[in-house]
Amino acid sequence: MTIRTEVRRFVDLGPLPSEDDNSEEGDAAFDSLEQALHAIERPINDAEAALLSGSFGADGCFGLAWTLLHLIETAPTHLPLTEPTASANPWIRRLWLRQQNALADS
């Protein structure tokens, strides 16, 4: 599967920064990530979802983590494919739990 330039551009910026970063560099990184994330057209493919899933940080990054999560959920195959460990990134665990809840509701 092809990974689009916009997805690579976002991933190349690194993981989402922490909300605790009050530096000017952190603000600039946030702005760049926000613009790059919003430039990705939905839906994404499975390869893009797998690549993007490595971009979560430790917290919500002022809402960007939710935007990333919703983008990943547009892929045809829901990730992760298996239950993450208890020590996995909380956003990956959240993706898993949302998938399991959706399956239970159907």
Image: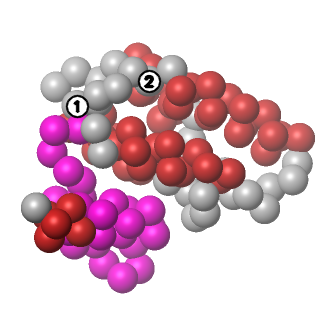
The segment highlighted magenta reads 75-100
Query: Is residue 46 shown left or right of residue 29?
Result: left
Q: Label 2: state its secondary structure.
A: loop
Q: Which residue is drawn at 14% across and 70% down?
A: 104
Residue 41 vs 86, above or below: the answer is: above
Q: What is the C-alpha distance between the residues marked 2 and 1? A: 11 Å
- Quadrant of the snapshot with the C terminus: bottom left
Query: Which labelled disc corresponds to residue 81?
Result: none
Query: Is residue 100 shown left or right of residue 49?
Result: left
Q: Is residue 27 in view?
A: yes
In the picture of the structure, the residue carrying the numbered disc 1 is: 45
Comparing 83 with 8, the one in front is 83
Q: Label 1: state its secondary structure.
A: loop
Comparing 45 with 13, the one in front is 45
Q: Position of residue 21 (x, y in %)?
A: 80, 55
In the picture of the structure, the residue carrying the numbered disc 2 is: 40
- Quadrant of the snapshot with the N terminus: top left
> Which amino acid is tagged 2?
Ile
Q: Position of residue 58 (x, y in %)?
A: 58, 64
Q: Which of marks 2 and 1 is nearer the N terminus?
A: 2
Query: Is residue 16 shown left or right of residue 105?
Result: right
Residue 99 vs 66, above or below: the answer is: below
Comparing 64 with 81, the one in front is 64
Specify whether residue 82 is painted magenta: yes
Q: Which residue is drawn at 73% across and 58% down?
A: 19
> Which amino acid is tagged 1?
Asn
